[in-house]
Image (cartoon, rainbow, N blue to C red):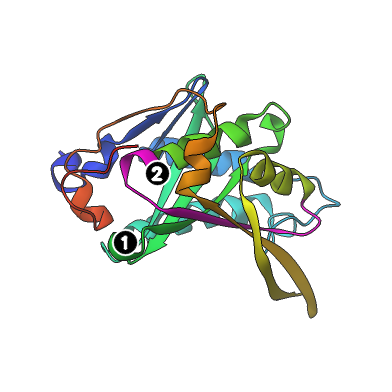
Amino acid sequence: MIMDHWPLYGLRVRTPRLELRLPSEEELAAVAGVAADGVHRPEERPFLTPWGELPPAERARHVLQLHWSRLGRWTPGDWALNLVAFHEGRPVGIQDVRAVDFGVRREFVSGSWLGLGHQGRGLGTEMREGMLHLAFAELGAESATSLSFTDNHSSLAVSRKLGYRPDGITRDVLHGKVVASQRFRLSRADWERRTDRPEVTVTGLKGCEDLFGIAEEPREG
């Protein structure tokens, strides 16, 4: 079985409404179809990835290739975990968590997208809540980072709601023009201080510790 060689396929993160996990190939095709249907309104540009400018078929292929490439390049010192979010058994988007030298730095960065037809119901916030629990309570992270375009108000609102603090500005080039992104940082202490965190359960982590570059016994949350 593939889990004998890649135990991450057994990892499950469950929130009140969602399950986050690696997909099967058929499920990967399904979430690629969600991306093909759109992840933001045509008049918006909330990501550096040109989702709105790519034809639907290319959006789907981008999801497939990014998923495969991240698995293929994975090392304990440089990894990126693409967790597909399932709502009522169907994929609705992807929540990722990425880190370099996590075993030493205990810091990670995350990103996500949610299918346009599934937005506006708090699922994006819940996806990130599940990811934060995995990272802080199970993997022993000390800080989380995120960034969003300064006009991506929905993403900025999620970061602020979850206790992230401003951490500077990043400048990128998009279509020959400079675009600014607000960086955010969430400390372990600020995450633990929140009293409104939802119930999250994680199973299947045992046996994955080496892949994340951490000790066999994960830190307690």
Residue ID at (16%, 42%)? 207
Residue 148 magenta-drawn? yes
Q: Nearer the viewer, residue 100 or 89?
A: 100
Magenta span: 136-152
Mark 1, other Cα within 10 Å: few <14 / some 14–19 / many ≥20: few
Quick one: SS at disc 2? helix
Which residue is disc 2 drawn over?
136
The structure residue drawn at horizontal position 69% and vertical position 26%, both measured from the top left corner, is 121
Q: Is residue 152 above or below residue 119?
A: below
Q: In this picture, is 48 found above or below 165?
A: below
- Left or right of residue 181: residue 216: left
Image-quadrant location for residue 102:
bottom left
Residue at the location (38% across, 51% down)? 141
Q: Secondary structure at mark 1?
A: helix
**Labels 2 and 1: the sequence-earlier one:** 1
Q: Position of residue 219 (x, y in %)?
A: 27, 43
Residue 72, label in figure = 1
